[in-house]
Image (spheres, rainbow, N blue to C red):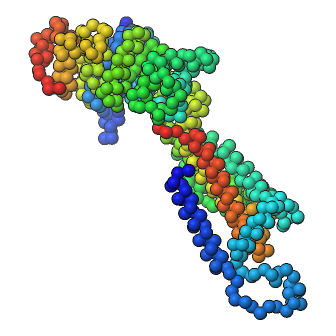
Amino acid sequence: MSAGLIKSALLSLLFFVVLVGAWHLATLPKGERAPAPDEYAKLLGKGAKKSAGFPTPAQIGETIVKNLSEPFYDRGPNDKGVGIQLAHSLGRVGLGYLLAIVLAVPLGFVIGMSPLIYRALDPFIQVLKPISPLAWMPIALYTIKDSSISGVFVIFICSAWPMLINTAYGVAAVRSDWLNVAKTLEVKSLRRAFKVILPAAAPTILTGMRISMGIAWLVIVAAEMLVGGTGIGYFVWNEWNNLNLANVIFAILTIGVVGMALDLAIGRLQKLVTYVE
Amino acid sequence: MAFLEIQDLKKTYPAPNGKTVTVFEGVNFAVERGEFVCIIGHSGCGKTTILNVLAGLDTASSGVVVMDNREVAGPSLERGVVFQGHALMPWLSVMKNIAFAVKSKWPQWNAIQTQTHCQKFIDLVGLTGAEHKKPAELSGGMKQRVGIARAFAIQPKMLLLDEPFGALDALTRGTIQDELLAIVQATHQTVFMITHDVDEAILLADKILLMSNGPRAAIAEIVENTMPRGRTRHDVHHDPQYYRIRNHLVDFLINRSRQMQSGAAGARPTTVRPGLAAPGDAPARAAANVINLKH
């Protein structure tokens, strides 16, 4: 590891310590209250031991350990392990995202190849693109009549645009030199599409897919809060209703870490297809 | 009929003011099988357009190109092109760039046949050992060598080179010129090449086409290289003919290319042999050759 890397890691650690320290100080119990009578404490049960208000870092640590030690438990509809919730969310995102790839990338290819189709479809794209994916939710619920599949649909809608636009752009921007090479070699159109245009446009397409994944992961949380049932978004909402802020914070951290992992995975893929000119 | 016949070629573009701009017209020339022809002219005279028409990448507004008794209509594997900016695919290695071309020509070949064939041409341009490098890892000269190898590898009937050495430094350019000359003479390849470099044209070409300035450019003259084949960069300038030809070309580029415009359509450009008795206006040519140019 280079000296620069060590320095930046140390600095990161310092920031982390400062942040957690500040948090700890901010959430210290304020003053000693007169202890409640024993009978009263018994009535309240364990709850009395918990300090009221925002959880301390130590409590969050406890929550993380507790949740991660048993991620896949299932005790009824409102009490499932975070692993199960995440699996639901990832399943919806994966399905909607895959659907978006299957439809948007080939369509983007066609749009990129044909200026005519590009101009014909452009007004539709311009109008549909800025619509919040959640605005589709009522339509999706009404037509699909299934909350889980509606979630998939919303993911599909929000992932499709960046992929579509980036694919079209990438395909349209393929250097004419390379296309001319293919022409002089009498390369057939299918081979040209897969051997010249696709590799040439792949970095741009992957950029679109990376943006899409980011948006999809943002949207799934909101969508699941809205429709409920399962998923990490629903988990956040449910814990809020339970007034369990420690679990909410844990869920937020989980969402962040998983989002980062997804981004890194696509970033890795992107590196594979990137070329230096 | 010659191997390649260009008859009455004309290219026009619509101008913004509604009129049409004629880039060149009345372009007539012929290339014999095995001949090396260079075309020289100032920027904007339409050299690249002519080459693209020969390649089938562009269409002329009127006129025909006939190669080997067939009209050229669209690109073909019979004509290999070396592009100005090498046009290698940056995501493919040297070997795979060439293999892409080879597989286009002989799709029925298996992997070993394709690789052996590619290797032969990689060795030919002196890139042995760089087979698995990506274009970004190569120098400008090496990239252009790959471009040349790719064009030769499909063994076209005719090779078209669009200023292939324009972006290279003088030293590299000299080396690759020698290599190209050696390959062309060994394979008896018919070549049509655009260049800006007078010395390059004299070294490589059997025939040099001089284009007048655009718009309405035309082939003004065809200069025959009267020096014997087998010229090399090291001895070509010892031949007294060298300076006569060189002066003639430089004089054309500096003075006469401006004055001439648009040969009458259908007319054949005159063939001149600088320094030697040429049919027609020999005294005038001789006078032109005396002009001392500081180069």
Residue B93 visible in the shown view: yes
Q: Quadrant of residue B211?
A: top left
Residue A147 visible in the shown view: no
Identity of the residue drawn at 59% across and 53% down: A211
| Image position of A70 with respect to A181: above or below | below
Find residue A119 and report its horizontal and vertical position in percent: 52, 45
Identity of the residue drawn at 17% across and 22% down: B251
Identify the image quadrant of the C terminus of chain B.
top left
Front-most of B150 and A150? Answer: B150
| Image position of A103 with respect to A179: above or below | below
Front-most of A179 and B262? Answer: A179
Front-most of B280 and B88? Answer: B88
Task: State how many labels appear.
Answer: 0
**In this picture, residue B269 sits left or right of residue B64:** left
Find residue A20 and report its horizontal and vertical position in percent: 63, 71
Identify the image quadrant of the N terminus of chain B.
top left
Find residue B129 and report its horizontal and vertical position in percent: 50, 24
Find residue B17 and report its horizontal and vertical position in percent: 31, 41
Identity of the residue drawn at 45% across and 17% down: B124
**In this picture, residue A237 sits left or right of residue A266:** right
Identity of the residue drawn at 28% across and 19% down: B201
| Image position of A99 with respect to A12: above or below | above
Q: Quadrant of residue A151?
A: bottom right
**In this picture, residue A192 sits left or right of residue B31:** right
Front-most of B176 and A217? Answer: B176
Q: Quadrant of residue A36?
A: bottom right
